[in-house]
Image: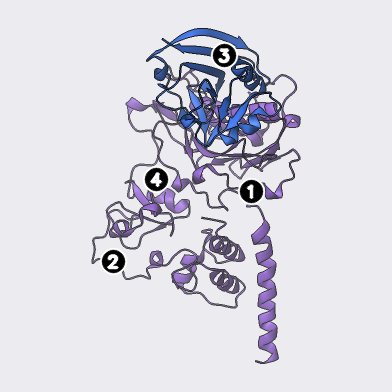
Chain colours: A purple, B blue
């Protein structure tokens, strides 16, 4: 083996190590990076919340010292809130009276009343981290437009549970709330709430749930915040179109199908996830349409009429070398492709573009490695 | 111990805790044995009680004992002569609930009292005796 090859191998190894070390120890910056996706949330069925990730938070306590902190993400270009993270304790809780917050109008805000809504007003200014936990009141980065139902039936009970745990034990709770917006919607579909008690390693308190931003009896247009009584018919908004029918997501491959697709019949039960999201929303959320039933088109393809294109959905997401498994070798190969040492086919690119930004980058290699070592789903 | 709506626990953990409630329970039990699941031991830290930890408190065969159900309550209370119910008077989320209909068959409420908790403004205690 000549000197050049040896140096190249050493360089590749060192580059891999430099990228791998942070991957193995870093706490995910977001729930999405750790595997959360709105596409996995079941349709609202009467409960204000749904367990996510088996009730286990996506973050780990191992990198937090237990000292109190609060971090409020920056508003995006549309003025929407990002995730907020905190280590809550007695020291973060309010000591005085709560002030006014009427000056803040979060995105999608509308002042509208309905008799069917408790308190009449459909929308509340919802704190992502409740005031009773953080004393943050009129902070624009901590307020979203939420329904009365989200605020009182969804989020408040979890905030009560957390506050009372802190007051009783004097301990700390690692806490994160992530509002979930689709596309350019001004109204969040709901919030992902995660919490874990620090000093007892989660024995006292731990949850990971999605609270729905809905209001029973009211139809809401999440694009604008407009609403109407449910019996008056569909809310103005995007017209139902191709892909409006329910879909089945393969949680393992990230591909979604029409319910009668032959691939669904062959799918393992544990990987099946039903969703009522339309095709456009699923693609927006990072899922790929099945190349057999083409849920992104108006009508499903029948067997025998598959389009002659590379079956990207047949390859596992992250399976760069096509061996049917996602391993560290796939991460390494993807890293090489990211730095120009490998050239990927369209199929490989489609399978390894983990973050859906239409490019294969070191970030994708990082996500593949997390998948390979079991840190991400 | 239940929140508003009858919630007992969420993801295997009681919806809330309060040292004053456990002291009250220990006082009620007096010299009698107080049986609880192993995970409840931490709740009685600093509380003087004859605590016995068993994996299945529901199956305990110790006569004249108190049995604490803080994570799940058996649907059939037929084995018990007395039920002491603590209400947190707070909204908490839950995935395990206590069906209070179990108290309507064979029990009658004999006592209701309230007291301030350590971390709860008001805790209600109800005692039901078998008729």
| Residue labelled with disc 2 | A306
Question: Whole-percent x and y of residue A363?
Answer: 60, 62
Marked residue nearer the N-terminal end (2 or 1) = 1
Depicted B28 relative to depicted A347: above or below: above
Marked residue nearer the N-terminal end (2 or 4) = 4
Q: Nearer the viewer, mark 4 or mark 3?
A: 3
**Mark 2 → mark 1, Cα distance in angstroms:** 44 Å
Hey, which quadrant is residue B100 in on the image? top left
Q: Are marks 4 and 3 in contact (CB under 8 Å)?
A: no
Question: Whole-percent x and y of residue A260?
Answer: 27, 53
Is residue A372 left or right of A290 when viewed as pictured?
right
| Residue labelled with disc 3 | B124
| Residue labelled with disc 1 | A60
Q: Are marks 2 and 3 on the same chain?
A: no
| Residue labelled with disc 4 | A277
Disc 1, SS = loop
């Amino acid at each position: 083996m000549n000197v050049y090859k040896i140096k190249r191998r050493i360089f590749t190894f060192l580059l891999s190590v430099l990228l791998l070390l942070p991957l193995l120890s870093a706490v995910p910056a977001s729930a999405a990076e750790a595997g959360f996706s709105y596409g996995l949330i079941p349709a609202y069925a009467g409960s204000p919340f749904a367990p996510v990730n088996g009730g286990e938070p996506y973050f780990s306590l191992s990198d937090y010292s237990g000292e109190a902190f609060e971090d409020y993400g920056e508003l995006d270009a549309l003025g929407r809130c990002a995730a907020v993270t905190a280590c809550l304790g007695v020291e973060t809780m309010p000591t005085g009276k709560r002030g006014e917050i009427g000056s803040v109008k979060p995105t999608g805000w509308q002042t509208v009343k309905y008799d069917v809504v408790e308190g009449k007003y459909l929308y509340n200014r919802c704190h992502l981290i409740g005031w009773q936990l953080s004393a943050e009141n009129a902070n624009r980065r901590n307020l979203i437009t939420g329904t009365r139902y989200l605020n009182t039936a969804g989020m408040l009970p979890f905030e009560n549970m957390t506050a009372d745990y802190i007051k009783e034990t004097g301990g700390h709770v690692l806490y994160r709330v992530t509002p979930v917006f689709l596309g350019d919607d001004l109204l969040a579909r709901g919030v992902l709430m995660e919490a874990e008690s620090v000093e007892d390693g989660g024995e006292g308190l731990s949850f990971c749930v999605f609270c729905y931003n809905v209001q029973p009896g009211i139809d809401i247009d999440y694009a604008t915040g407009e609403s109407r009584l449910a019996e008056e018919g569909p809310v103005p908004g995007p017209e139902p179109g191709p892909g409006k029918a329910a879909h089945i997501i393969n949680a393992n491959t990230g591909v979604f199908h029409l319910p009668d697709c032959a691939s669904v019949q062959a799918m393992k039960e544990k990987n099946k996830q039903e969703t009522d999201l339309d095709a456009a929303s699923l693609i927006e959320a990072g899922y790929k349409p099945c190349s057999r039933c083409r849920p992104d088109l108006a009508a499903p393809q029948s067997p025998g009429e598959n389009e002659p294109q590379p079956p990207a959905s047949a390859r596992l997401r992250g399976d760069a070398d096509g061996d049917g498994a996602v391993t560290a070798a796939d991460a390494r190969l993807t890293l090489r492709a990211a730095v120009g040492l490998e050239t990927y086919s369209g199929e490989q690119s489609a399978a390894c573009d983990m973050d859906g930004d239409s490019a294969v980058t070191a970030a994708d290699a990082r996500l593949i490695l997390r998948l390979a070592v079991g840190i991400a789903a | 111990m239940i929140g508003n709506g009858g919630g007992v626990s969420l993801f295997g953990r009681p919806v809330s805790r309060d040292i004053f409630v456990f002291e009250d329970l220990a006082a009620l039990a007096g010299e009698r044995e107080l049986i609880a699941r192993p995970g409840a031991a931490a709740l009685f830290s600093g509380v003087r009680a004859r605590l016995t930890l068993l994996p299945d408190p529901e199956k305990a065969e110790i006569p004249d004992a108190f049995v604490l159900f803080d994570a799940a309550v058996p649907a059939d209370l037929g084995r018990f002569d007395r039920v002491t119910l603590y209400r947190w008077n707070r909204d908490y989320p839950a995935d395990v609930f206590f069906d209070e209909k179990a108290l309507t068959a064979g029990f009658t409420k004999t006592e209701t009292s309230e007291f301030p908790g350590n971390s709860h403004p008001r805790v209600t205690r109800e005692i039901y005796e078998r008729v």
